[in-house]
Image: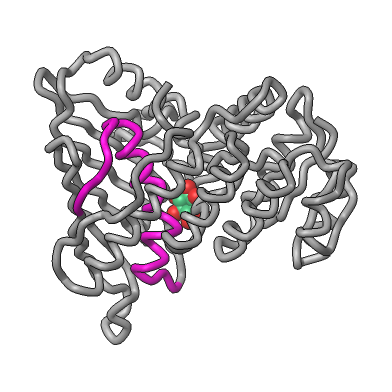
C-alpha cells in the first residue's frame, strides 16, 4: 500500500506512527486543520501535508484512508472514501447520529462489497480477544450477563450525550461482539459533573437487555482520579469470565501491595492499535477488511441513540434500526 490519508490528533498521530512501522504500508499523506500538527506528523513519516480531505480521498495515488478527524466529520469522509472505492479504517464513532450511520451503510451497500472498517480496537486487545475465544468455545455455557466498566481519567466538559456517542460506543460494541447478540433495550442513569448543567456527565450506567434474553450493565466513569481501566465480566450458566485489567507487576513492599495503572487509552491499548493496523493492511491487500464492519458501526449508533432517548425520557428505550443486510450476514 503506497499511501494513506490521516487526519491527526492524538489518535491520528498514534495511527501514523503505527502505519509507518507496518510492513506493506506507508504514510504518504496527512491532513489536519492544524497545519503545524499535521506538519509534525508528516515530517516523522516522510508524508506530504494536504489541506483538503476530499481532495486527498480521490487522489489516485492514495490507496486507502484512515480517518482520525473529529467525530462530526467521520460519516462524510467515510462515504467519500467508499464512493471513491478506497478501503477506509474510520475511527469510532462511524457517525454521530443513526441517520448518518445509515448513510455510510447504504453507501457501502451501493458499492456491493466491504470497504469500511470501524476503529473498535478492543477486538485486537489480547485480553478481550482471549475472552471472546473462551466464550465462543462455550467454556461458561450460555452467557447470561455482561458487565462492562469504562474508567476514564478526567475529561473536562463531558456531556452525557458525548459520553455515550464518543466513549461508551466502545462498550456497546464490546457487549454486542462478546455476547454475540444485539442489544434490544437500554435504560440510562447518570450523575451530572456540574449540578447546574443537568446534561453534564460525571458517572453513568446503561442497563442493557439483549435480544436473546441476557442482561447487562455498562458503567462509565469520567474522572477516576487514578488512571484508565477497561474491565469486562461475563457470567454464564457454568461460570464467569473476565478480562485482566492490567499486566503491570504487582509490587509488595512496606506493608503495601500496589500495581501501576495505565494513565489513559493510548497506553492501555498501544499493542491493540498496532495489531489493528497491521491486520487491516494485510486484509485489504488480500481483498477486503475483516475487522468491525459498517454494520457494527451502525448498530452501535442504534444503541447509542436508544441511550440518548432514555436520557431524554428518563425511561427505558428500545433500539430501533434497519434489518441486517445480507452483505453483513455472518459467514
Ligand atoms: C477515546 O476516543 C477512545 O477511543 C478511548 O478508547 C475511550 O476510552 C475514550 O473514552 C474516548 O474518548
Camera-nearest residue between 257 and 116: 116
Magenta run includes residue 180: yes
Residue at the spot 46% in from the left edge and 70% down from the top edge:
156
Residue at the spot 28% in from the left edge and 73% down from the top edge:
192
In the image, residue 193 sits, relative to residue 38, either above or below, namely below
Is 103 positioned to the left or the right of 282 in the image?
A: left
Magenta run includes residue 91: no
Q: Is residue 264 visible?
A: no
User: Where residue 166 sits: x, y (%)?
Assistant: 45, 58
User: Where residue 42 sits: x, y (%)?
Assistant: 84, 49
Q: Main secondary structure of the magenta part?
A: helix
In the image, residue 216 sits, relative to residue 168, either above or below, namely above
Label count reads 0
Is 155 positioned to the left or the right of 323 in the image?
A: right
In the image, residue 167 sits, relative to residue 182, either above or below, namely below
Camera-nearest residue between 107 and 305: 107
Quadrant of the snapshot with the N terminus: top right
Give residue 54's quadrant in the image: bottom right
Quadrant of the snapshot with the C terminus: top left
Q: Which segment is the magenta one?
A: 157-185
Is 139 positioned to the left or the right of 62 in the image?
A: left
User: Where residue 62 sits: x, y (%)?
Assistant: 82, 42
Residue at the spot 26% in from the left edge and 68% down from the top edge:
309
Q: Is residue 149 visible?
A: yes
Amino acid at each position: 500500500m503506497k499511501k494513506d490519508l490521516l487526519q491527526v490528533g492524538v489518535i491520528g498521530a498514534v495511527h501514523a506512527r503505527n502505519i509507518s512501522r507496518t510492513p506493506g504500508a506507508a504514510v504518504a499523506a496527512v491532513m489536519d486543520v492544524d497545519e503545524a500538527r499535521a506538519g509534525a506528523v508528516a515530517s516523522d513519516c516522510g508524508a506530504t501535508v494536504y489541506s483538503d480531505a476530499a481532495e486527498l480521498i480521490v487522489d489516485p495515488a492514495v490507496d486507502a484512508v484512515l480517518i482520525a478527524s473529529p467525530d462530526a466529520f467521520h460519516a462524510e469522509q467515510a462515504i467519500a472514501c467508499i464512493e471513491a472505492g478506497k478501503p477506509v479504517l474510520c475511527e469510532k464513532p462511524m457517525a454521530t447520529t443513526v441517520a448518518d450511520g445509515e448513510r455510510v451503510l447504504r453507501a457501502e451497500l451501493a458499492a456491493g462489497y466491504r470497504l469500511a472498517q470501524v476503529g473498535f480496537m478492543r477486538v485486537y486487545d489480547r485480553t478481550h480477544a482471549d475472552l471472546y475465544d473462551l466464550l465462543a468455545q462455550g467454556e461458561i455455557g450460555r452467557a447470561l450477563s455482561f458487565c462492562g466498566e469504562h474508567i476514564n481519567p478526567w475529561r473536562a466538559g463531558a456531556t452525557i450525550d458525548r459520553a455515550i456517542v464518543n466513549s461508551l460506543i466502545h462498550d456497546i460494541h464490546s457487549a454486542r461482539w462478546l455476547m454475540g447478540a444485539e442489544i434490544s433495550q437500554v435504560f440510562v442513569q447518570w450523575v451530572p459533573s456540574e449540578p447546574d448543567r443537568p446534561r453534564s456527565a460525571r458517572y453513568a450506567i446503561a442497563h442493557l437487555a439483549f435480544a436473546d434474553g441476557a442482561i447487562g450493565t455498562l458503567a462509565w466513569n469520567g474522572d477516576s482520579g487514578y488512571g484508565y481501566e477497561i474491565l469486562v465480566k461475563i457470567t454464564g450458566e457454568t461460570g464467569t469470565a473476565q478480562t485482566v485489567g492490567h499486566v503491570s507487576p504487582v509490587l509488595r513492599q512496606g506493608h503495601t501491595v500496589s500495581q501501576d495503572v495505565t494513565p489513559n487509552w493510548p497506553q492501555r491499548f498501544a499493542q491493540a492499535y498496532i495489531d489493528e493496523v497491521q491486520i487491516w493492511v494485510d486484509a485489504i491487500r488480500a481483498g477486503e477488511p475483516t475487522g468491525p464492519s459498517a454494520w457494527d458501526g451502525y448498530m452501535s449508533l442504534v444503541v447509542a441513540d436508544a441511550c440518548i432517548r432514555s436520557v431524554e425520557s428518563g425511561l427505558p428505550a428500545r433500539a430501533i434500526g434497519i434489518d441486517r443486510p445480507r452483505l453483513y450476514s455472518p459467514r
